[in-house]
Amino acid sequence: MIVRGGSVVTTEGVLPADLEVQDGRIAAIAPELPAQGDEIDARGLAVFPGLIDVHVHFNEPGRTEWEGGATGSSALAAGGGTLFFDMPLNSSPCTVDAAAFDAKRAALEKVSYTDFALWGGIVPGNRGHLGELAGRGVIGFKAFMADSGLPEFPRADDRTLYDGMCTAARLGLPVAVHAENNDLVAARGSSIRDYLASRPVIAEVEAIRRAAVLAKEAGASLHIVHVSSGRGVAEALEARASGADISIETCAHYLYFTDEDMQRIGAIAKCAPPLRPSAERDALRAALLRGDVDIVGSDHSPAPLSMKQGDNFFAIWGGIAGVQSTLAVLLDRGCRPERIAAVAAANPAARFHIARKGSVAVGNDADFALVDLDGTYTVTKDSLFQRHGLSPYLGAEFRGVVRRTVLRGETIFQDGKIAGAPRGRLVTPHATTRIHT
Ligand SMILES: [Zn+2]
């Protein structure tokens, strides 16, 4: 198959070229390749690497009424994505041992339209299961430094986190943390304003510093998920400068919305850490544009409408559903295509040791999205492929229409529709050299 006349987006630049796809891989990239087999007309379109979303909660199996692998992966594909990393919660059971991993893998292999990788969890008492999770092929281990909201996934106290990091280092896998200081997070009152005040930026900053100290001591690679503030990025950069092996993830909603949007939109925009004042949002965006943010994910974490209602904002289930909108938000925020290719594809593949994915390059899987960068659209409930049409982006006008998404050489999304049957496969990290001894 030949993909004809597109502009190939790499981290280095954008160049006009044809692609030759053979057996699901990219066989050649060059101008005016000779005709052979099928042709895809990509004239006027950007050829992005298939986006890799390192942070989603599709809740398969066990809580598919909240989302599910079929709907979640459809939404990802519609947004130009070809691979997601599913968090160890809120599926049931949570991915804290091999049996739970096997159940999730089996469930997702039946329903996922995109490839997937799985995070394992670090919770008090499961240290003995980290080795078997590594053996199954988890991408890394996730821990919560503040309450997760889900009783069966308790937060990691400092000892649990440090011990888990030591084990993860021995296994050659990174540890991802939800970085908020649990003692600084204080539920008081019931309003949206009270909720915002209950989770100050300092709770994030302090937790990032502590996690970095523990990870450095343990010899572990540390991934900070959903950094919500410019100060959080600055703290992580300081930790890196002092020798910690640390990667910085933010999520599209922290680049787009502010605390005032949370007050305007309400529960659909509830998340933790919360949306921040515009100064922090703008500092975060500046960090992204400078190249100080490594990875942008979605933290797609949906719930049914019934869980998004109530008078006490603290009691309402948190989580923003945005897996389909990451590319759009990055374009909206002024991110150049090369930078998008880095933070949403190449960097995730490199950081988490995924072979043959993350860039449009000869020998890699033919995972890519054809995007009309001049096309515009308005986000409506009908345009979303997730299970529930609850999104803070409803009504937003975006530039950059995904015309087609291709996974290992097969079209999985085209012109507003999912194509073909679910054929997602488990992706595992390739073996890494251990630094720690
Ligand atoms: Zn999350």
Image (cartoon, rainbow, N blue to C red):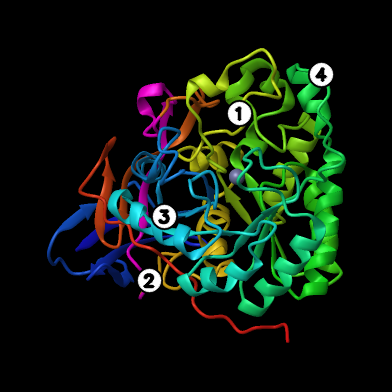
Of badges 2 and 1, nearer the viewer stands 1
Q: Nearer the viewer, residue 244 or 130?
A: 130
Q: Which quadrant, please, contains the C terminus?
A: bottom right
Q: Secondary structure at mark 4?
A: loop
Q: Residue furthest bottom?
A: 437
Q: CA distance from mark 1 to mark 4?
A: 16 Å
Q: Which residue occupies 73% across, 43% down?
A: 284
Q: Which residue occupies 71% across, 47% down?
A: 227
Q: Is residue 335 magenta?
A: no
Q: CA distance from mark 4 to mark 2?
A: 52 Å
Image height of 66 relative to 82, above or below: above
Q: Are marks 3 and 2 in contact (CB under 8 Å)?
A: no
**Place of residue 259 in the rendered image (x, y in percent of width and height, measured from the top left):** 73, 26
Q: Tag 4 or tag 1, which sits nearer the N-term?
A: 4
Q: Tag 3 or tag 4, which sits nearer the N-term?
A: 3
User: Which residue type carries mark 2?
Assistant: Asn
Q: Pointer 3: what residue?
A: 104
In magenta, the rendered stretch is 363-387
Q: Secondary structure at mark 1?
A: loop
User: Which residue type carries mark 4?
Assistant: Gly
Q: Pointer 1: what residue?
A: 317
Of badges 3 and 2, nearer the viewer stands 3
Q: Quadrant of residue 27?
A: bottom left
Q: Tag 1 or tag 3, which sits nearer the N-term?
A: 3
Residue 364: which numbered mark, if any?
2
Dot 2, crowdedness within 10 Å: few (<14), some or many (≥20)?
some
Q: Which residue occupies 29% across, 56% down?
A: 5
Q: Nearer the viewer, residue 270 or 355?
A: 270
Q: Nearer the viewer, residue 302 or 398?
A: 302
Q: Tag 2 or tag 4, which sits nearer the N-term?
A: 4
